[in-house]
Structure formats: structure tokens, C-alpha cells
Amino acid sequence: MSDTAKPAPASTQDIIRVERVKKHYGDVEILKGVDLTVDAGQFTAIMGKSGSGKSTLLGIIAGLEKPDEGDVFVMGQMLAGMSDNDMATLRRRSIGVVFQGFSLIPSLTALDNVMLPTFFSGETSAAERRQRAVDLLKQVELGARLHYHPGTLSGGEQQRVAIARALMNSPSIILADEPTGNLDQETGASVLELLLDLGRTHGTGLLMVTHDPDVAAKAGNVVEMKDGRIGNGHT
Amino acid sequence: MLRYAASELVFRSGRSLVTAVSIALAVLAAMVLTSLATSYARALRVPIETVGADVIVQRQGDIPPKLEGLVFPHPNALLPANLVAQIKALPGVIALTRAVYMWDLEPDRYESVLGIEDNDVGLGALGQRLIDGKPIAAGDRVVLLDSDFARKNKMKVGDNIKVGVDEFPVAGVVDAARSGKLVRADVYMPLKLAQGLATAAPQVRALYPFGADDANLVLVKVNREHLQDVVEKVTALIGKKGVVSSELSMRNALSGVLFLSQSMGLIIAAIIGLFAAAFVWRATATAVAERRREMAILQAIGWSWRHIGEQVLIENLALAVIGTAAGLVIALLVVLALGHISVTVDLPWDLSSTPHFIPTAAINRTQTITAPITISWLTAGIATAGSLGVSLLAVLAVLALPRPQPWSLLRAE
């Protein structure tokens, strides 16, 4: 991390703290001053209609989108002003991401896709990293598909590879953007259960954007977004 | 990253193949064209170099009143001793050999006669090509015969041969064909002897005030860096009627042959290289554009833009290495298969040793010159550096374009 990263003023139990974040796309104001806190190990669901700004908020928390105003703190690090390298390091060490689209690299096998976030990790040996990737793929019931390319896997299998990849670096939190949106109901339910189980097993927090009330019902904290603002949530 | 690069290149095998092939073709073209051009340039020097000179100096003269006895051929007019001294003093001239070249025209026969200095270009060189008899030196009153001439006239060592009005013993027979045909003669003798014969020859005296130290043919060895300069200065010294032969004039004589100079070869190779570079840049730009979402995914899972740039660079460099290696190997095979280049030179009359009014003269007017084709390792180095450089620049140029916004490519809404 660079020395310019400022510590969050709030509790160190906060994995994510969002303060007065605003975002415009052209003349349209998507986020109108959002505040949000996500605690360690917590499953938080962000619900809202299309265009309510929930995915934009997730992108800003991931550091893949820049807010026009306001501050975002992840693991106590203020994202504003961080260099590209520092931001990449923060994501690599602390954040796992799962997208609606399956977002695997088509040229790589399932095993190599899971190992991708650790390509630049000098903390463990290549053999250890490979073993962890194999273990994770076994945990998502793809132990027999290690060397399959994404094109030869079903949608549900691809999403399970993506979940294994998100857990590869033992992140503090997984950011999931409609992870079951492209799956049929049954597959979606099993993927969700897997995500929640693994989250609990690995002690990883989960911040998930979803349309689905049934998914949200499993969350410890639900945040509702409406017209770029956080509405009434429940715990 | 290497594993990722290998997977990516295999996954996009069509694009990888086309890119590598375009690099290979550029390297191949550069190698083969420059090798051919270098060999061609070397072949052009062969006729001149085989007589131990870089420049042959002659002067156009007049036709003698009578074509009988010893005469100077039309392109071998008097070169006075003081003019020869001026040529010898020119910057870039390393050595100079004087000679007197004559035809001995009799009613029933003719022979070409060359008197030349006793040095490693003159009598010394002839001594090395002896196939019978013994070498001759500056003060001798004996001659050497060309082996073809001796065979045709059934002459051998120990016989006497009439040159002009005098007779001389044959001391040896030489295989002059191996020394090239430009100054080939039937009879060779020491320079002083030939100067004496020329001074006394009526048909020479009728045209020129030929002195005992004069010559009518000069072979000049020059520092190759000064070749052009020496040729220009000698041409200026001997005036309009001068005939200055060098590889430069040989090139002009080969007007019917494809002109392929070293610089032309390099220019053609450079043009092909530019097309290949443009293709590599376009292929890189297209590949990066097609992989925008993939790059967004890599950013989302913790790759920095620098890491992504390094990944694309590794992939491009791998293609450059594969393409360059393939191009070099194929070029080596092509050069090995070609072996040597052959150039047929239509010698102008002033470089031919045979009187043009002799019916068989046409036989001597063409010469096929061969030179081995060799690989230019300097070109190989330049081609390798060029292909790697092009690949590097293509990546830098493409990555310098505005970066994609990763979230816009990944978000669900």
C-alpha cells in the first residue's frame, strides 16, 4: 500500500464504509449521497429496481468505478487517491468478486482460472497455490473438472469456478453482483447455498446485489436502494 | 504468466499463426534479399578482383594506319608515365601495376601480348598459375603462354614464339583462365620487354609517342572506402577518352540484369518490414479490443494495468520470437538451397581481350560470374531486434490508448 492511503475514521470492525457517495452518468445522478457500513463476516444484500444504482455502488466499493463525491473505505483504506497498483493489491488481498456473467478467462482451464488472482503472490509457493485451488474446486464440487475450459462447463459450473476464484486469496469480503441472475432457479439456489456455506466456512463477509427477495431473505442485513439513495433496510 | 500466455496463444491459434507468419515473412525477406544483394555485389567485384585490382585504367585511342604487326588495341592507348604517377599518388590508392597490352597481327594468325610488372598482381600471379615450365622475372627475355593458346597452336615449353619481329623462348605455360578474362592474353612477358617492343613497333609509333616507361593499361588496388572517389579522380585525370573499369562500371554494364544493389535489398526488406509492423500493431490492437472484458475481469480480481500490459507484452514477444526463429531457419534453408548466385556479364569491347574483328571474338564477350550466397548475421541481428522492437512498440502503442472502464463491462444492470 502507498503511504497516501488514509485510515478510516470509524471502527476497525467495518470492512466497508461508504460516506456521502454521489455518482453521475452524464446528466443523470445515479447515486445521491449514499452512506453504508458492512461489518466483518456479515452477509449484506443490496436490493432495488433496475437503475436504482445498486450495481454502481458495488463497482465503486470494488474500486472499479470512481465516485464523483464522497469517500469509500475498504479494510480501513481510503480508496480515493490510491494508485492503480495499490488498488490492485487491495482487491487481490481483501476482495473477491463474483459477477452475473460468468467472467472466466476462456483460454484457461478451471484450475488456472482459480489460480489467476495469485499469479503475483509471492507469499506462497506455486505448489501451495495450486493445492489451494484444487481444494477450492473440490469444495465447489468440481474436483473432476480441474482441466476443463469454461466453454465446456455449464453455467452453474462456471459460476462455481468463479466462486472458488473469489475465495482463492482468502478475502475479507466477496462482492457479488447478481451472481444467480443468469442461472435457472434450481441451479441459482444451489450456487447461492454454496456461496453462503463457503462464506461461513472461510469467515468471509458477503455483499450481494440482488433482485430476488428469496435471496435477500437469507441475508443478515438488507439494504434497499431507491432512486440513488439507501432506503429503509432491516436486519 | 507464461502459462497464461501459452494458453492464450493456443486458444487464439489462428491469429497467433497469422501474426507469427507475417513476422517470419518479413525476417525471411530481409535475410534473403540482403543475402542475394550482398552476393550480387560480390559477384560484380569478381571480374575486377581476379586480376588483383579494384580499378582498371585504360584510354580510348585511334585505329593504326595498318592492321599489321604489333598494335595497341583501340581501348589501350598511351598512358604516359607522368599520368600513371599522378594516379599512383591519389589518396586511397594502395598499389598500382603497369602493363602494356598489344595485339600481334600477322597475315595468318594473331596473338594478344601482355607485358606486366613483376609483382604479386603481375608476373608473380602468373607464376602461381604455372602448369608447366618455370616462372619469369623482370629482367628475363622469355615469355609465358596461356594454356589454351599453347594447346591450340601446339606449342610447349622450350619452343620459340615470334612476337613482332623478335623471337622469344617459351619458359612456361600458365592456366590463365583461373585468373579471370579481363586482362587475359595469349603471351605474357616482363613489362620492360613489352615496353621495348612497343617503342619499336611502327604501328604504335605511328599513333603515340610511346616512351620506354609508358604503359597502356594500369591496374589499381584501392581502399574500398575510397573506390568512388578514386574512380572519379582517375576519370578526371585521363579525360574524356578514359575507360575506368570497376565494380561501379560493371554494374552499369549489367543493365539487362535485375538491378539489386545492397541498398535496394535493404529498402525492399524495410518496406516488407513496415507492412509486417503495421500488421503486428493491428493484430495487437484487435486482440486487445476483443479482450476488453477479459482485461476488466483481470482488473477486478487484482491485476494492475501494468500486470495486464506485461501479459500482453509476453504474448507478443512470444509471437515475435517464434516468427523470427521461423524466418531465420527458413532463410538459412533458402540460402543453403540457392548455394550461389550466377550473373552473366556482357563484357564491353574495351574489357575484352580479343580483337572484335576476329570471327570468334564473341565467345569471349560474355562471362558468367558466380558468388556464394551467405547469411548476413548483421541482418539477422537487425531483423531480430526489429521484430522484438515492433512487438514491444505495438503493445506500448495499444496500451497507451484510453483504458476501458472495467465496471461498465462487468456490471449486471
Image (cartoon, coloured by chain):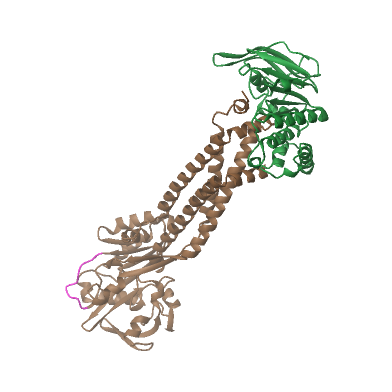
Q: Which residues are magenta?
A: B60-68
Q: Magenta span has B382? A: no
Image coordinates for residue B267, horizontal then vertical, percent: 42, 49
- What secondary structure characterizes most of the magenta part? loop
Residue B223 seen in render: no
Q: Residue at x 60, y 40 (%)?
A: B313
Q: Residue A148: name its quadrant.
A: top right
x, y percentage for residue A81? 67, 20
Instruction: Compare residues B292 and B135 and report the one nearer the observer.
Output: B292
> Is residue B92 depicted above or below B406 in this figure?
below
Residue toward you, B148 or B116: B148
Task: Judge left or right: residue B166 versus residue B147.
Answer: left
Q: Nearer the viewer, residue B321 or B413?
A: B413
Work out which quarter of the rendered image holds the C terminus of chain A and state it: top right
- Indicate the chain coloured brown by its letter: B
When asked about the image quadrant of residue A136, the answer is top right
- What residue occupies the far front of the structure in this picture? A186
| Residue B85 position in % (x across, y down) | 35, 62
Colour in which the image shows chain A? green
Residue A67 vs B223, above or below: the answer is above
Image coordinates for residue A77, horizontal then vertical, percent: 74, 21
User: Is any atom of residue A41 visible in this view?
Assistant: yes
- Check the image and name the residue furthest to the left: B65
Identify the image quadrant of the N terminus of chain A: top right
Note whether A188 is above or below B60 in the view shown: above
The one of B98 and A4 positioned closer to us in this rendering: A4
Give the side of residue B60 with respect to residue A24, left or right. left
* Count of numbered circles on the image: 0
